[in-house]
Amino acid sequence: RSVLNRDRTLVKPRAKVQFHVPPNTSVTVRKGLYRHCVMFRWKKSVRDSTIDTLHEALRDMRRRIGGVVVNFTFGDDACGGRDSYDFAVVADFASYDDFMQYARHPRNRELSMKLLAPMIRERASAQFIL
């Protein structure tokens, strides 16, 4: 199975799942999911109430866009390290096309532009195949 790279060229996934399964144990692993990870550092002016609003908006978005998202998690930084980001979102999709449907979804675009954009001091993201 191939996916489109950032420059729209096809690439083969290189990730492998390697682990030992003890006898008489079954494990289900879903290989090939397209994972989207995004991390944010907030502006100093961001208030807790705004972050609470973001949490609720992301829970709502999961319900509205649920058909294309396999897994969707998010949360505030748990350790508070100097190099840590303040917040992260991780979403899994069955395919690159599903990811693009999510990325272009009006609800995602609205949340990104109206709620997130004014909060963001710094953003980092990566997409990879499980």
Image: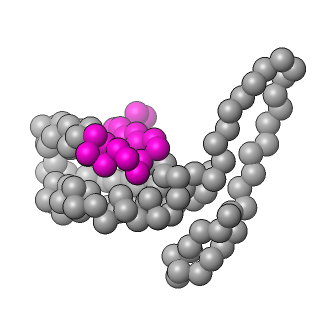
Position of residue 99 relative to residue 80, above or below, is below
Q: Can residue 28 be seen from the camera position used here?
A: yes
Q: 57 or 122, which lies in front? A: 57
- Res 53 quadrant in image: top left
Quadrant of the image for the N terminus? bottom right
In percent of the image, x 70 and y 68: which residue is there? 12
Residue 65 against residue 56 in the figure, above or below: below
Q: Residue at x 59, y 68 (%)?
A: 3
26 vs 121, nearest the viewer: 26
Residue 57 in the figure: left or right of residue 130 = left
The x, y position of residue 11, in whole percent, is 66, 73
Q: Is residue 73 magenta?
A: yes
State left or right for residue 108 relative to residue 47: right
Magenta part of the chain: 61-88
The residue at 35%/44% (across/down) is: 66
Q: Is 41 within the magenta?
A: no
